Amino acid sequence: MAHPVQTLVNGKISNKLSILDRGLHYGDGVFETIAVKDGKPQYLHDHLDRLMCGCRRLRIAAPQLHLLKADIETLCESSSVRTLLKIIVTRGQGGRGYRPNGAIQPTRIVTRYAWPTYSADYQTEGIAATVCTTRLSRNVKLAGIKHLNRLEQVLARGEWCDEYQEGLMLDTDGYILEGTMSNVFTVQGDTLLTPDLSQAGIAGIMRQKIMQCAARLSIPIAVCKKNLRDLENADGVFFCNSIIGIWPVRTLIDKPFARPRIIDVLMAELGLRK
Amino acid sequence: MAHPVQTLVNGKISNKLSILDRGLHYGDGVFETIAVKDGKPQYLHDHLDRLMCGCRRLRIAAPQLHLLKADIETLCESSSVRTLLKIIVTRGQGGRGYRPNGAIQPTRIVTRYAWPTYSADYQTEGIAATVCTTRLSRNVKLAGIKHLNRLEQVLARGEWCDEYQEGLMLDTDGYILEGTMSNVFTVQGDTLLTPDLSQAGIAGIMRQKIMQCAARLSIPIAVCKKNLRDLENADGVFFCNSIIGIWPVRTLIDKPFARPRIIDVLMAELGLRK
């Protein structure tokens, strides 16, 4: 088996980046994390779509799609049964100063990592989650984008060690937004609810897949603003992302949550059961 | 003369960084920009103090001060009359995932750049400034820290080309905060006012020096919240940072501003006249 961590920087095998890259200096870029099964990147089209959309919103010159796809193919060819790809696209090497230079070429970084080992219990039995004290700041210009400015997530994830599997993050106005590395849904009766991400947060691919799936199954779905008090009326809560799939919440801090049938229906429909 | 751009990464001459560095992945680090005159870094103690304070607040293991000082000395030794140092300290090389690993060593990156060429007129005649539409988000956990999550500044600086020399940024609540690369002061009668940075913004070293200088000269100074309408009552406005010193504002969008005598008093006192 090839070494689990291997990186292509602008198409060439490398483990180094220029010290002048704006990704380092300003977090001036976007990223994607993609599950690879049997050499096939999952939901690739959706991931690349979001990457391009992020570049457009940040006015980063988009990487050439055929080159990016060739990088992905190269790393998937030699991958084991299950691996993970992380794509980073930065604005490129700038000089000093915030001003973005329209003429520079974006930097493509594609890394293959070993598949993370999460207990199967997280899917079958559910997880213990906490509520983070670190809040997510609101800025409509950055909301939804999977960009490289992730200090809030780093601080939030630093609030606990192994006693929880995920932490719920609120925005600075106290509205529930997402997990540190995932999106969140609540189940209320027969309805699926998920936070509005127009002011902050990352619009995840798995979140999008769940919403599409719910629509297909005629499960009512609402995008809304809820605070922690509203959670008391929830019948169930789950986190999701492209790597973990769906993790139902067993407890949030000390409050236990049931596992409404709708969660298993979604997991089955999306092929997420191990 | 040595090449103007030279970098030490953890004490060794290099122009490359590990692709796994958390500075790239999450903007997980802090930085300083220091003016060097005749081989001597200006306000070095204050810059290092702020760097260490930023590390503490982000729970990044502080770099060993004697090593950092040795890096700075090495780059200053071979520097020309006027150069600029940028120090970046990141949390180090992590694996994948937001969770900060307490055991990793921070990465020290010290780069010497050529001194930027700004027209002397910006000091003597003042500058033309704009008001950016990109807002600064509010988060008390990050406010004041000179960290590497700088997409808001990049977007703001991308709003104009050469027609202005600086842009005023408001926070998402509409309060005046700072320039894209500087702090801001207004003069009202005999009083100096500067925005409160408890919710957002970078607490600059030159801002601190100006406040100390004002106190020494018995110039009344107030830290306060002001919006754009309040600016109509201002007698003068200026931007400041460690590199530009003080730039009085000649016009803000179309509104002309006078240059109250207090600005020249501060410039003289701080040795900022060219």
Image (cartoon, coloured by chain):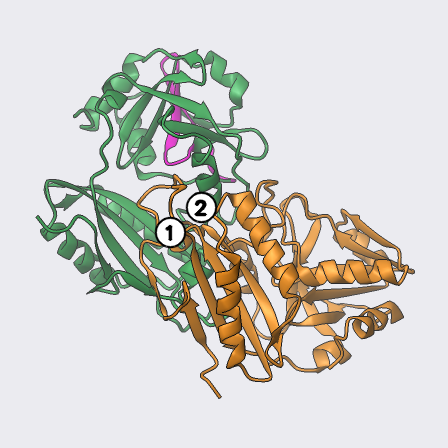
Chain colours: A green, B orange
Residue at image location 18% in from the left, 24% down from the top: A273
Residue at image location 19% in from the left, 58% down from the top: A71
Residue identifier under label 1: B25
Q: Are marks 1 and 2 in contact (CB under 8 Å)?
A: yes
Place of residue B122 in the rendered image (x, y in percent of width and height, measured from the top left): 71, 77
Residue at image location 77% in from the left, 49% down from the top: B226
Q: SS at mark 2?
A: loop
Question: Mark 1, chain letter?
Answer: B
Check disc 1 and give the amino acid type.
Answer: His
The foreground one among B67 and A118 is B67
Place of residue B50 in the rendered image (x, y in percent of width and height, measured from the top left): 61, 54
Residue identifier under label 2: A150
Q: Is residue B251 above or below residue B205?
A: below
Residue A59 appearing in the image = no
Q: Is residue A73 left or right of residue B73?
A: left
Q: Is residue B31 left or right of residue A52?
A: right
The foreground one among A24 and B87 is B87
Q: Quadrant of the C terminus of chain B?
A: bottom right
